[in-house]
Image: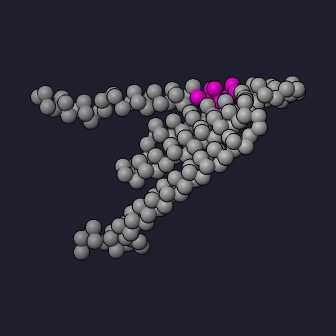
Amino acid sequence: MSKQSDEQHKLIVPGLWVERIEEVFHIVLGVFLLAIAAAALYFSVVRVFETNPFFPTGMIQAINDILFIIIILEILRTVVARYTDGVFQLQNFLIIGVIAAVRHILTVGASMTLAYGKTQAEFDRAIVELGVSSAIVVALVFAIFLSKASNTFPTANSKRSKSVEAN
């Protein structure tokens, strides 16, 4: 008996079944995320018309809701890419992180602008939140830059193959 057939007999669940089940889960997750995004859009539109006063509270809430929907759609894009390419893409996660951090910055900044009579402790906490979120945005953008830059550098294998081709 060959070594490969011995390994196949040791498997509890065939690999093909696992792949098919994983594909079904990705499809279900994608549909579920799309439904969540559609529901979030519906409730965001309803909330815009119900928020009183519209300026500035309704506008700030609408921007916050839109960024939330964008985050959901980016996660959906990542799930779809995982389903089609078979790998999770680092840049998509980094972009989701940047959007989430910017959303938090906008929310904290808006609450600082609209909330009169905040205590010094609440103000200090909001400033620290803004600083931390800003540092997160800078770090994530730098990570995106490094990720894109690493894709342009030749790897050791490509250098070796070029030197072999030259000889």
- Quick one: 47 or 88, which is closer to the camera? 47
Q: Can residue 22 be seen? A: no
What residue do we see at 85% from left, 26% from top?
116
Residue, far left = 167
Here the colouring is one colour
| Rendering coords of residue 62 (x, y %) | 65, 37
Q: Would residue 35 be found to the left or right of residue 162 on screen?
A: right
| Rendering coords of residue 30 (x, y %) | 48, 55
> Can residue 134 be found in the magenta stretch?
yes
- The image quarter containing residue 2 is bottom left
Q: Would residue 69 be found to the left or right of residue 104 on screen?
A: left
What residue do we see at 46% from left, 37% from top?
91
| Magenta span | 128-137
What residue do we see at 38% from left, 69% from top?
17
Q: Can residue 148 be seen? A: yes
> Can residue 108 be found in the magenta stretch?
no
Relative vertical location of residue 18 with respect to residue 34 in this rendering, above or below: below
| Rendering coords of residue 97 (x, y %) | 56, 37
| Rendering coords of residue 146 (x, y %) | 45, 28
